[in-house]
Image (spheres, helix red, strand yellow):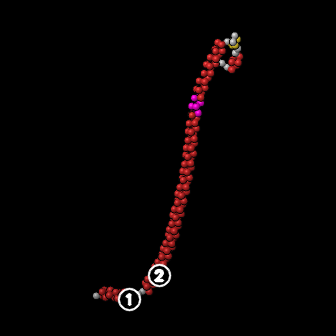
Amino acid sequence: MSLSKIDLLNIKFSKSLFGYSKSEVDQLMAEVAEVLGGMADDKKQLLKKISRRESTIAEFRQREETLRDTLMTTQKMVDDLKETARKEAEVIINEAHSRAETILQQAHNRLAQIHEDINELKRQRTRFEVELKGLLESHLRVLEIGDPDVEKVEALESKLKFFKKAK
């Protein structure tokens, strides 16, 4: 049975010789005791539920805090890894630029050396042509002038041929 505050205030006891009827008061007291006992049990159960729920909430809050810490740590690690990777990339790029500049400088030096070699070969060719031309001209002059010894030899040979025919 459930009794409300209004029910209790509206109860009227019948009167007897020494006051209110004892059986009616006892019956009401029993009903009130039963209602209060049920309410006390309900209150205990509700307090237990609240305690369990608060414990669960505290556990969830602890988990949330742990997850937040983990997320923050992970984010910091990711940021650190990104920064490290960026720095390593810069170092690699700088080294590549340096190597490229060195290779380019070597290529320019080699090109300059090749141009020098070509010019030297041109000078040598020109000098060789001049020397060869001079040599050929001197031989040509010798041939044109004729060698007196060669002419003597030729004259002697023709005389010999003539004598051989005459015999």
Write down the residue under mark 2: 134
Answer few, some or many: residues within 10 Å of disc 2's Cα (few below 14, many 20 plus, some between 14 and 19).
few
Seen in the image, is 94 located left or right of residue 155? right
Res. 70 visible in picture: yes
Span colored in magenta = 48-54
Q: Which residue appears at 44% of the width and 86% of the height?
A: 145
Q: Position of residue 54 (x, y in %)?
A: 59, 33
Label 1, secondary structure: give it. Answer: helix
Q: Is residue 65 magenta?
A: no
Spot occupied by residue 134 in the image (x, y as percentages of width and height): 47, 81
Q: Callout 1, which amino acid?
A: Asp
In the rendered image, the vertical position of residue 70 relative to residue 84, given as above or below: above
Pick the residue in front: 112 or 57: 57
Separation of marks 1 and 2 at Cα, in angstroms: 24 Å
Q: Secondary structure at mark 2?
A: helix
Left or right: residue 154 versus residue 74 is left
Identify the mark nearer the N-term, 1 or 2.
Answer: 2
Question: Which secondary structure is most common in the magenta stretch?
Answer: helix
Q: Quadrant of residue 152?
A: bottom left
Residue furthest to the top in view is 17
Q: Nearer the viewer, residue 166 or 33?
A: 33
The quadrant of the picture occupied by the N terminus is top right
Asked if the residues shown at circle 1 and circle 2 are in contact, with their CB atoms under 8 angstroms apart, the answer is: no
Q: Is residue 46 left or right of residue 13?
A: left
Residue, disc 1: 149
Q: Amino acid at mark 2?
A: Gly
Q: Residue at x 69, y 12 (%)?
A: 18
Residue 162 appears in the picture as rendered: no
Identified at 52% across, 70% down, the residue is 112
Q: How many residues crowd mark 1 within 10 Å: few (<14), some (14–19), many (20+)?
A: few
Is the residue 40 above or below the residue 72 in the image? above
Q: Measuring 55% from the left and 46% from the top, which residue is drawn there?
A: 73
